[in-house]
Image (cartoon, coloured by chain):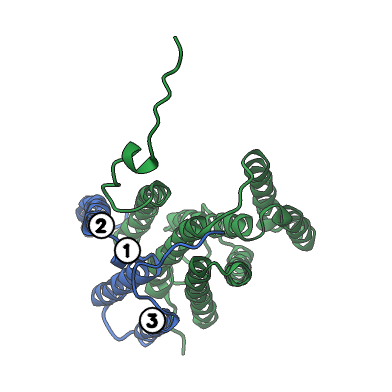
Chain colours: A green, B blue
Amino acid sequence: MADVVVQHSMAEAYEPSLFGTYSKKIGMWLFLLSDSLTFGALLFAYSYGRISNPDWPTPFHRESIINATIMTACLLSSSLTMVLGVLAARRGDRAWTRNWILLTMLFGTGFIVLHAMEWSKLIGEGMTPFKNPWAANVPQFGGTFFTLTGMHMLHVTIGVIYLGVVALRKKWLPILLVIWLAAWLATPADNVFHTGVHVLLIGAVIAAFILFLKPKDYDAHDVEIAGLYWHFVDLVWMFIFPLVYLMSTRITG
Amino acid sequence: MHTVAAHHDESKSQYLWVWGALLLLTAVEVVLAYKQVFQPVQMLEALMVLSIIKSALIIGYFMHLKYEIASMKWVLMAAVCACLCLMFVFFPDAFRVVRLGVR
């Protein structure tokens, strides 16, 4: 049977969206909703442990809190540069869209590096997912801390790769591979990030699949959706920072 | 890259104000925690109220939810709040464990 070709314009073919916006944006919002439940579950699990253990360790002294505050400022500033990138994309200003997104990625990378250094310091002090040197009877501190902050660090890393795809497209792949190699070779072999940095390689492979199988010129809508993801990562940190760090400060002297 | 008409009034200065407010709220949180202004439970409540204000600013302005239509706002926020609030069901159990004591 011959296909029936229906001639109509787009406006007749589709009803207006119930939510008054384009479907890609609704899709990203739905993903973020489900992702907020993932982080919600991890944060509630952490808080459950925190409440039910009076001996919960408080290892975050002055330097850790200053470090975490700088990390928070990095993420907040990256949200500002991201939103300015979205504004530039709406104006049709390609150069500034790219520049603002690159600045966002720089802040995000700063966050990841600071966080990785802090992880290395805690691991150096003897903290693992199964024990910690501050409270022997609260072994779940390491497990919940590393799961929660590791999941968030993974999201920031994915966000930086995602933004690189939107801003630089195929030019991003060699840069990402160089960053992967440099980070791999720069971290000591006994450091957890010597292995963890391979996330960048997996990210590069997935980004390559997307860029080569569905090459496209990312428009203002795509920039806005990438921005939604990025702001969500920032938003989650706004809960991790007080719950994990500020509620476990160690005040000495 | 085709331009998308901005259907609402937004300017760089507005985003700078929101960014400044977020940094200020973060500073307040750090001072509250470091000076140990409140007892732990009140501290948790104060930090959570500040964090919810911060997340409202991020969702409303940076994620542009303020400019979406009413059904989008309500469906998204009602769904996420309802689902997250359901997780509070675990907390009475955590308090029960505290009362039992760690053995």
Q: Please give the residue where the numbered disc 2 appears in the rendered image.
A: B77
Q: Position of residue A227 (x, y in %)?
A: 48, 62
Inspect the image, locate mark 2, and give the three-letter code of the amino acid beneath it: Met
Q: Residue at x 63, y 68 (%)?
A: A113
Do the residues under discs 2 and 3 have CB atoms within 8 angstroms? no
Chain letter of disc 1 in the image? B
Is tag 1's residue or tag 3's residue first in the polypeptide sequence? 3
Is tag 1's residue or tag 2's residue first in the polypeptide sequence? 1
Closer to the observer: label 1 or label 2? 1
Q: Is residue A223 left or right of residue A99?
A: left
Chain letter of disc 2 in the image? B
Q: Is residue A142 visible?
A: no
Do the residues under discs 1 and 2 have CB atoms within 8 angstroms? yes
Residue A157, picture quadrant: bottom right
Q: Quadrant of the N terminus of chain A?
A: top left
Q: Please give the residue where the numbered disc 1 appears in the rendered image.
A: B65
Query: Considering depth in this image, is A55 or A224 the residue closer to the camera?
Result: A224
Is tag 2's residue or tag 3's residue first in the polypeptide sequence? 3
Query: Considering depth in this image, is A95 or A48 the residue closer to the camera?
Result: A95
Kindly indicate whether the residues beneath marks 1 and 3 are on one polypeptide chain.
yes
Q: Please give the residue where the numbered disc 3 appears in the rendered image.
A: B14
Above/below status of A29 relative to B25: above
Inspect the image, locate mark 1, and give the three-letter code of the amino acid beneath it: Leu
Q: Position of residue A144 (x, y in %)?
A: 44, 55
Q: Position of residue A230 (x, y in %)?
A: 48, 62
